[in-house]
Amino acid sequence: ASIPKDGPGSFQGMAMDPVATAASNNPALSTLVTAVKQAGLVDTLNGLKDVTVFAPTNDAFAKLPKADLDKVLADKALLTKILTYHVVPKKITTADLASGSFDTVQKGKLTTTGSGQEFTIGSGGAKVVCGNVKTANATVYIIDTVLMPPAA
């Protein structure tokens, strides 16, 4: 509901921009954009081709205890690890989400399950709240929980 109907942050507007720029125009993803900027990943994400991004909403970040979120935002290496865990270096369709296992840019694995409009991402039970959003270089699935990579 917080997605603009038209203009840069709308679904149509997002399709014109690379993924980090597209997210920056979407008010539901402002915390993610802050984290991406903090990690110095804007140009990296915008430069990738044909990737899939699982983008946590502001509400997803709000589920994290503030002290934990502040700690992650202050630790660039950890923040980069978490953010790149949300990126798969290939296009994933909704059909692929039904039962898939995908290598992430962070070198971890993400599993997905579901059908129709109901999909769960990762072991933390993140739900897709809006899927198959196109940007100039990525397919985006907006999710309700921040995905945490397994401890190395």
Image (cartoon, grey):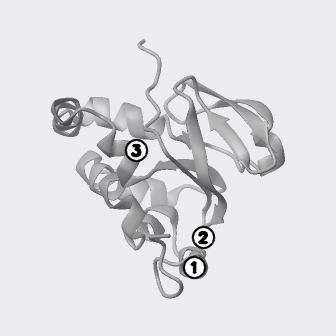
Q: Which mark is residue 136?
A: 2
Q: Amino acid at mark 3?
A: Ala
Please name the residue that numbered disc 3 is placed on. 60
Indicate whether 123 appears above or below 113: above
Residue at image coords 52%, 74%? 17
Residue at image coords 57%, 23%? 123
Badge 3 vs badge 2, beta-carbon distance below 8 Å: no
Residue furthest out toward the top: 152
Q: Amino acid at mark 1?
A: Met
SS at mark 3?
helix
Q: Which mark is residue 16?
A: 1
Tell me how far mark 3 sits from mark 2, CA to CA. 24 Å
Q: Amino acid at mark 2?
A: Ala
Indicate whether 131 appears above or below 11: above
| Front disc: 3 or 1 | 3
Looking at the rendered image, the quarter that the C terminus falls into is top left
